[in-house]
Amino acid sequence: MKKIDKEEYLINKLTSKHIGDDAAIIGKMLYSMDTFFEDVHFKRSWMNMTQIGKKAMLVNLSDAIAMNAKPKYALVSVSLPKNIKNKEIDALMGSLEKTAKMYGCEIIGGDTIGADKLHLCITIISQSASPLLRKGLQEGDLLAFTGTLGQSKQDLERLLQGEKISSDSKFYEPVLREQFVKKSRPYLHAGMDISDGLFCDTNKLLDANNCGCELLCEIKEEIGLSGEEYEMLIGFPPENLETVLAIARQTDTPLSVFAKAARNDKRFFCKSHHFKN
């Protein structure tokens, strides 16, 4: 019997037909929400308020971008610690709004509450005429990921050891592949962003399509288990390889083909990347 984690167990308790991707699709509109919690996703000693606001918004926008949707509106709820200063609130909200506007998204409301820690919960409302779904992968399709994976995990480990990391680290500022997804969408069968690590998210993609895979190259654990990368995991037919590679070059997007979908039950070793208090 397959062992499921508590997140999957909870999701399985819901019955809506709209559940299955990172955003729920209703008509041409997509609705997604992610949290960004202190001492779960970040520690305030690691990041200033501008960095916290930017990453919180980027990881939420990632769901829309990954599904080939255009972000339109955002609802932002924030729990504010009693010791937070007005200038910190200014930096946080300014960063949230600036980052949203970079992708044409407008913050239209939300909620605030007093709490012991800084927590953010963001809902993104986006629009797409051709959303990229997890379902659609076919036997023989190639699996590939964008970018260079591993830095997020490495830098998280450095932070946990009390070390400093570069201000341009992907742990602080994920890179969203908006143009690559938009241009390559007609040639893709399935896709999603890599938020829980390549191994975990490949398992999710395979589960959604009731298939397995065959590895085409070795993937080391420091790459496969690096969470919060927010790169793309995509599946496409072999005959589209050259076209997808050409789009990757045009959009300055590193692309690595690592496996192909197959009729087996292969899954990757997977564990949660979130740190504990």
Image (cartoon, rainbow, N blue to C red):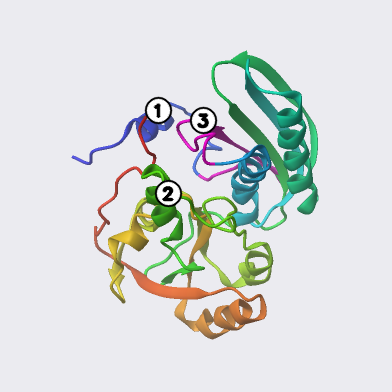
Q: Residue at x 40, y 44 (%)?
A: 162
Q: Amino acid at mark 2?
A: Glu
Front label number (2 vs 1): 2
- Say which quadrant the N terminus sits in: top left
Please state the horizontal and vertical placement of residue 233, each as a whole percent of the image.
48, 62
Q: Which residue is mark 1?
A: 10
Q: Residue at x 37, y 69 (%)?
A: 139
Identify the mark nearer the N-term, 1 or 3. Answer: 1
Tags 2 and 3 touching, CB below 8 Å: no
Task: Identify the magenta region.
Answer: 21-46
Q: Secondary structure at mark 2?
A: loop
In this rendering, the answer to whether 109 lies above or below 91 is above
Identify the mark nearer the N-term, 2 or 3. Answer: 3
Does residue 168 appear to the left or right of 4 in the view shown?
A: right
The Cα atoms of the two marked residues, 1 and 3, are separated by 22 Å
Residue 257, quarter of the rendered image: bottom left
In this rendering, the answer to whether 111 lies above or below 142 is above
Which class describes the residues within 10 Å of circle 3: few (<14), some (14-19), or many (20+)? some
Front label number (1 vs 3): 3
- Say which quadrant the C terminus sits in: top left
Identify the mark nearer the N-term, 2 or 1. Answer: 1
Q: Which residue is mark 2?
A: 163
Viewer-nearest residue: 40 or 69: 40
